[in-house]
Image (tube, rainbow, N blue to C red):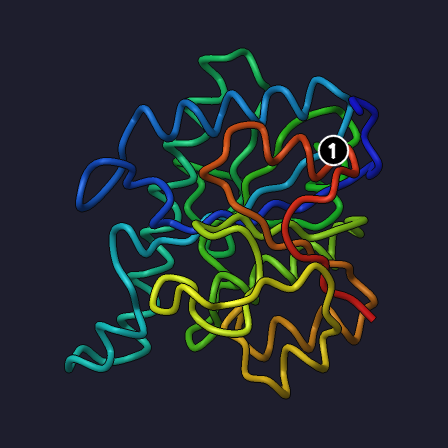
Amino acid sequence: MNRPQYRRVLLKLSGEALTGRVSFGIDPEVVNAIAAEIRDVAALGVQLGVVIGGGNIFRGGEAGARGIDRTTADYMGMLATVINSLALQSALEHLDVHTRVQTAIEMKEVAEPFIQRRAIRHLEKGRVVIFAAGTGNPYFTTDTAATLRAVEIRADILLKATKVDGVYDRDPVMDANAVMYEKITYNDVLTKYLKVMDATAISLCRDNGLALVVFNLMKAGNIKRVICGEAVGTVIGG
């Protein structure tokens, strides 16, 4: 199946996914591979927004727990997402994919400020829009930022790309007997304390009727498969 099932999509990538074979920072081969998959999706006519975490460079929450002022640490984490966003933008532009980076914190020399109407206009013109710097506020994760941006651009679906195949009843890395859900409701995710996204992000999806699919980014072609309606990963909704 090569026909997209969604017109407008928000893709959430973890910063850790960009490390690839390196222990810290950005692996150019991984970024280029992700960019190639995004190019293939954009070629189908799908309007695509992207949010990338910054955990491969800096984690605000963890740094805050180790003694850095939490607000300061979170702003440092937001800047890490900008670095990742610029790296992905560069990789996409090398593939002739028109791309814009919009940031929640104004930094006009490197990116546009986030303006909802402008973001939608870019998407309508076929440009990939990368949303950086989270929500611009401390104490909010990039998962929440991705959900917020998905709602703001009126995305048909939110895709969360991870290192595992979907949502499990237990951590599949720690427990080989963990069972993956094919479908699950938002309320079940919350009541079972499943570590999919933080509770704020899940509640925002639920309250706005935003469908969510969690899938494995490490399997080549999965982004396109999900967008084309194949049964990949875990569908969360209802």
Viewer-proximal residue among 154 and 194: 194
Question: Looking at this rendering, what residue extends furthest in the front direction?
Answer: 177
- State the image coordinates of residue 117 (x, y, percent, origin top left): 75, 46
Q: How many marks?
A: 1
Image quarter of the C terminus: bottom right
Residue 47 found in image quarter: top right
Where residue 72 sits, quadrant-wise, is: bottom left
Specify few, some or many for label 1: CA neighbours under 10 Å numbering under 14, 14-19, or 20 or more. many
Which residue lies at the image location 75% right of the left edge and 51% below the top edge?
Answer: 157
Q: Quadrant of residue 18?
A: top left
Q: Residue at x 32, y 51 (%)?
A: 80
Horizontal and vertical percent for residue 82?
Answer: 39, 46
Residue at label 1? Answer: 47
Q: Going by the image, does 214 lie left or right of 229? A: left
Q: Is residue 66 above or below residue 133?
A: below
Residue 56 falls left or right of residue 144: left
Q: Position of residue 169 (x, y in %)?
A: 55, 73
